[in-house]
Every structure is written in structure tokens, then in C-alpha cells.
Image (cartoon, grey):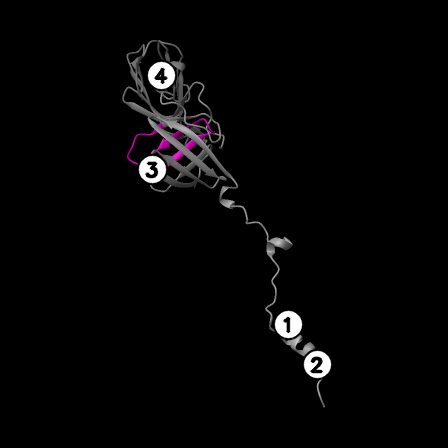
Amino acid sequence: MRASPWLLSLAVTGVLAACQPATESSPAADGSEAPPPLDASTADERSYAFRCGELEVHATYRGQDSATVVVGDRTFAMSSQPAASGAKYGDGQGNEFWTKGTTDGILILKGEPDRTCTGTGEQGGEAPPANATANADDDAAGGFRATGNEPGWLAQVGAGATPALHIEMDYGERKLEIPSPTQGRDGWSGTAADGTPVKLTFQRTVCQDDMSGQAFGATAMLTVGARQYHGCGDFAGAPSLAAKP
């Protein structure tokens, strides 16, 4: 029996169609391809610039858990540290950055003196000019107050060019007045009316009250005669170490 030419042509066409590769639809054409995900590492980043003494510091915070602190050509990866108030970050190697909001702070670098920091508070802004902290050593002219515990004591220096030094010791039972103490770069000294030598000194480093846990901008030491008292203090108008950046 002779095969029909029409059937033979149909069979050849089917074989050729079966040999053709499947055509893939373009993802761009059907719109099924999702856009690349956003980088989560930048979703909650905030950067602020500070002037810490002679150093320019840039701090990038990632949430409240970590921060990258760039000091000149040095970069420190820091994590959040326990603090009674304020925002404190450290790298576990003696380097810390403790801020009072976004405009004030303390930079602690291992083996170096603590530095007082000033910021503009502007996110992504530039560091304050180099003279921003030039008046830091003159803060004493605005007044200073220090307190300590066990036994409780208080020392207060008034404002002005010739401030008086007021001392209360033993929970206020003993009081001394030095009308015109000698003022130095790190404190005041003088002699009370009864002849007792008195000296109040401070160091610009974050200090925590050992009873209340409150943070202050300076440590303080009061020397009255042969007795020494240790505590914390701050200058008049200094912001509270309470706000987090």
C-alpha cells in the first residue's frame, strides 16, 4: 500500500517541531523577577561628627547596639556598654565613646588623656571647628559643683572672675568658706578662716555616683587638711548625661 504524501509531510513536520528547544519566557517581560533587597545594614544608621580636643571624630550608630567611631585615621568598632545614663560604647580594649545626646561627650582612648567632645547635633554634618573646645578650660569661670558619699560632702564654686568656694562635710555638720580661692587649671585652693588648708580638684572624665548611679562630666577630689574626699562633679550649664543619640 502506498503512503499518502500528505500524511508523510505531516509526520515530518511533527518530528521537526519536537526537536525544537523549549522557548523560555523572559523574567523582564512577565515582570515576575523581584527587585534586589535593600541593604539592611544601612536601614538604621545615623552619623554625627564631634570635635574632641584636637581630634575630629565621626561616629556612625547602628541602632543602639553598635557604633563605628573614626578618630583621624583610626577606626574603632564598638558595642553598647552598660551605663546608668547616656550612651556608652566601647571596644573592650580600653577605648570608649560616651555621649551626652549628640552635642557633648567624652572620648577615652587607651593610653591617652580623656577628651571632652563637642558636636553640632546635625546628622551627617561636619565636625565643629578646631576652636570649638578652646574654651573648655575656662568653664570653671561659670561655676562648679561636686558631691560625694560616705561621709556625704559638697563643694560649690560660684561664678565670676573671683568666685568663693563653699564646703560642706559630714552631711552638712561642718561648713567652710574660702572667699577668694586660688584658681588653677584643674581646681581651686585656699585657706579657711580657722586656718585649715582646702583644695578642690577635678579631672574631665565621666564619673558615676557610687550610690545613685548618676553620671557626671568630671571626677572630683576634695582635700581638707589631711583628709581626702572623692566624688563627682559638673560645671554650671553642663548637659545631663541622659540622652542617647
The magenta stretch spans which residues?
Answer: 95-115
Query: In x, y percent, where is residue 49?
Result: 42, 30
Q: Residue 17, which numbered label?
A: 1
Magenta stretch contains residue 98: yes
Amino acid found under the numbered disc labelled 2: Pro
Instruction: Name the front one of labels 1 and 3.
Output: 1
Q: Secondary structure at mark 1?
A: helix
Vertical placement of residue 70 versus 116, above or below? below
**Quadrant in the picture for the N terminus:** bottom right
- Of label 1 and label 3, which has the lower sequence position? 1
Mark 2 residue crowding within 10 angstroms, few (<14) / some (14–19) / many (20+): few
Vertical placement of residue 190 versus 2, above or below? above
Amino acid found under the numbered disc labelled 1: Ala
Q: Which residue is mark 2?
A: 5
Instruction: Name the front one of labels 4 and 3.
Output: 3
Query: In x, y percent, where is residue 98?
Result: 41, 33
Residue 213 shows up from this direction: no
